[in-house]
Image: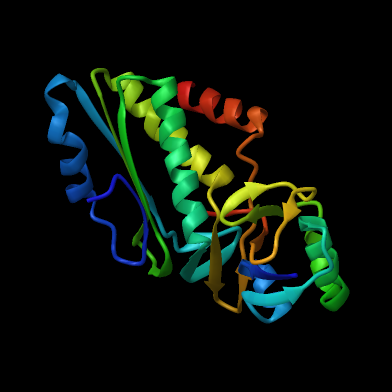
Amino acid sequence: MPLVAVTAAPLDLQALTAEVARDASGDGAIAAFTGLVRDHNQGRAVKFLEYEAYEPLAVKALERIVNEARAAWPATRLAVHHRIGRLEIGEASVIIVAASPHRGDAFAACRYTIERVKQIVPIWKHEHFDGGEVWLEGATADPDDEEARRAAHRIACA
Amino acid sequence: MRVTVRLFARLRDLAGSGELVRDVEGPATVKTVWDSLVADVPALVEYERTMSVAVNAEYARMAAAVKDGDEVAFLPPVSGG
């Protein structure tokens, strides 16, 4: 199983955790994050989401984030899978697993990764809600924006 | 010269297609391609200051050179996670 993936298949946290934990003898902690499709957003009743990606660039951006996290927390191993296509309420849209000798680094690497995903990975949510649909637009993706990267790091270490 | 343009999310909806083949005069930059696109689909211009661009699936700048056969992508603000 690849450590980084953009896939239309349902995400498997157990399998990804097993993959990261394969060389875990020096690790003291594994932290995991799962992002879920929520039934409400900005006052709208959400019916389902459709995720779209520019796949080759999305994979490269995820790999870049993994490398950034490794540089920040050198003993940490990280995996991240993002789902695309139609997702129902309660389904997992993204899973992140971080293994580290110390829990603090594992938690921080997880948090850093989801913050960076929201900043620089070319993936979009098309929200279908009661009464209409809308493309959600968050951050202007710029991997070289050091200010954004530092902000993600600050949140991760808060 | 001929380039492939990729559009995503609302940009794709506005243009009516996620993949277009465009002929532009060389030497060209990403901006040349964008301007030719906006001439045909004026509604796209609202994204000029908030979008990101990529050439051959690598992030790039508007001033980046574009060659015959390149894939040029225009990306609205992202909302993954």
- Residue at coordinates 35% horizontally, 19% vertically from top-left? A74
Asked which quadrant contains residue B53, the reply is bottom right
In the figure, is residue A153 to the left or right of A27?
right
Q: Is residue A144 above or below residue B27?
A: above
Q: Is residue B7 above or below residue A42?
A: below
- Residue at coordinates 47% horizontally, 27% vertically from top-left? A156
> Is residue A119 at all visible to an observer of this figure?
yes
In the figure, is residue B23 to the left or right of A101?
right
In the figure, is residue B10 to the left or right of A21?
right
> Is residue A139 at all visible to an observer of this figure?
no
Instruction: Estimate the x, y position of residue A48 in percent, counting from the top left.
Output: 45, 71
Instruction: Estimate the x, y position of residue A41 in percent, counting from the top left.
Output: 55, 59
- Residue at coordinates 65% horizontally, 61% vertically from top-left? B73
Image label count: 0
Asked which quadrant contains residue B8, the reply is bottom right
- Residue at coordinates 82% horizontally, 63% vertically from top-left? B26
Q: Is residue A125 above or below residue A131?
A: above
Instruction: Estimate the x, y position of residue A145 in percent, counting from the top left.
Output: 66, 33
